[in-house]
Image (tube, rainbow, N blue to C red):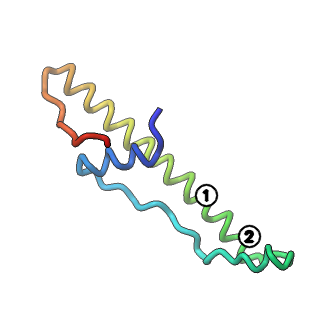
Amino acid sequence: MLSFNRKESILRRHGIRVDPFPVRALPYQARFYEERRRLPQAEVDADIGLALAVAAWRRRIEGLYEAFRLDLKARSAAGGVPPTSPPLC
């Protein structure tokens, strides 16, 4: 099974527009963990927001890759030549 990063790379190589990987809304604040202080609600919300954004990004990548794979399969079955891709190295 391919990783999400590998699927994203394959899609990009074939010219399919893919959203960039989501980033955290607030920069990570290690001082709260080092000082063992309670995290502010904004920090908790940023973590939750990032987790939701990553899950949505993964679903989009999976859906785009599945559509791409089915398109290649249909072209191959119809006798068309699937597009060539650069080596995966």
Counting from the top left corner in percent of width and height, residue 30 is at 72, 75
User: Residue at horizontal 40%, vertical 44%?
Assistant: 6
Three-letter code for the amino acid on which mark 1 is drawn = Leu
Three-letter code for the amino acid on which mark 2 is drawn = Val
Where, by quadrant of the figure, is residue 29 drawn?
Answer: bottom right
User: Height in image: 86 above or below 52?
Assistant: above
- Per the image, the residue denoted by label 2 is 44
- Per the image, the residue denoted by label 1 is 52
Counting from the top left corner in percent of width and height, residue 23 is at 53, 67
Q: Could you tell me which quadrant the C terminus lies in?
A: top left
User: Residue at horizontal 45%, vertical 37%?
Assistant: 2
Q: Would residue 2 appear left or right of 72 to someone viewing this image?
A: right
User: Height in image: 19 above or below 44?
Assistant: above
User: Residue at horizontal 33%, vertical 33%?
Assistant: 69
Q: Would residue 8 appear left or right of 84 to someone viewing this image?
A: right
User: Height in image: 45 above or below 58?
Assistant: below
Q: Would residue 21 appear left or right of 81 to someone viewing this image?
A: right
